[in-house]
Amino acid sequence: MKVLKSSAAEMRLIGGRLCLDFVNTVDGRKSDSPRRKSQSVNTLVLGDKLKDYSDLVEWSRHSGIITPTEAGRLIQDSKRGTTEALAVFQRAIALREALYRIFKAMVTGRMPQSVDLETVNDELLKARNHERLINTQKGFTWEWIGREAALDRMLWSIVHSAAEFLSTADLSRLRECGGEECGWMFEDISRNRSRQWCHMQDCGNLAKVRRFRTRLRSSSRIKR
Ligand SMILES: [Zn+2]
């Protein structure tokens, strides 16, 4: 587990994809993965960076999917519609955890659970209701409609990113950080597919220190 990671608006975005950075909005994860392939992935979130709707908005602004102006308006609107904001927040966490379990299944060679895929598809359906093909001077492009009034607009971009990643990316490049109780996900785009850590300054250095201590212990044992 990484310690003292900054708040939602200052988190490192190291996943290489929006959907992976979204799954990484936790300090760490304690894995309780069963050995049998048929069983689902159980993990415990350590230090959740998304504690309420405003954290979700702040992270969305930080990751660039909404502008600072949009973020300000969403916070204002959420105060008028607290029940709806809470429902969006709960959907966001359900989506994040479903995505984590799907990605974890991919990394460990398991089949993802259909209930998790359903969660993603439900969100995808909601997002696609807001997608329109428009013609611009530069050609046809996709545009989100109804953004202004929607408290859940960030979820559209996140689930879109997840669907694109799962359906078009080389999933053999998907990795979970090797750090103890980290659980962060990233796309390894290094040429020799050798990236092990979410960030060298976090888990990479911790692992180095741990290896060094182990070596020291074993060499002192040999001397005795
Ligand atoms: Zn890590």
Image (cartoon, grey):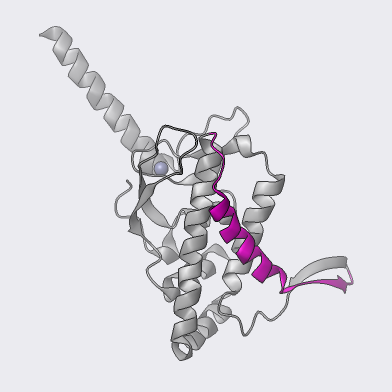
Residue 26, compared with residue 185, is above or below; it is: below
Position above or below: 75 against 49: below
Decide if residue 62 is on the left or right side of residue 214: right
Of residue 190 and residue 185, the one placed in the foreground of this image is: 185
**Frontmost residue, 92 versus 6:** 92
Q: Which residues are magenta?
A: 109-137
> Percent x, y for residue 175?
52, 38
The quarter in which the C terminus is drawn is: top left
Does any portion of residue 142 appear in the rendered image?
Answer: yes
Q: Position of residue 13 (x, y in %)?
A: 50, 54
| Residue at x-position 58% and y-position 67% | 155
Picture quadrant of residue 103? top right
Q: Is residue 37 above or below residue 167?
A: above
Work out whether residue 220 or residue 52 is closer to the camera in this orientation and state it.
52
Kindly identify the residue that appears in the image at 65 percent across and 63 percent down: 124
Residue 14: in sight, yes or no? no
Q: In this image, 45 relative to 99: left or right?
A: left
Q: Residue 183's spot in the image, x, y percent?
A: 42, 44
Magenta region includes residue 10: no
Quarter assignment of residue 119: bottom right
Residue 57 placement, left or right of 162: left
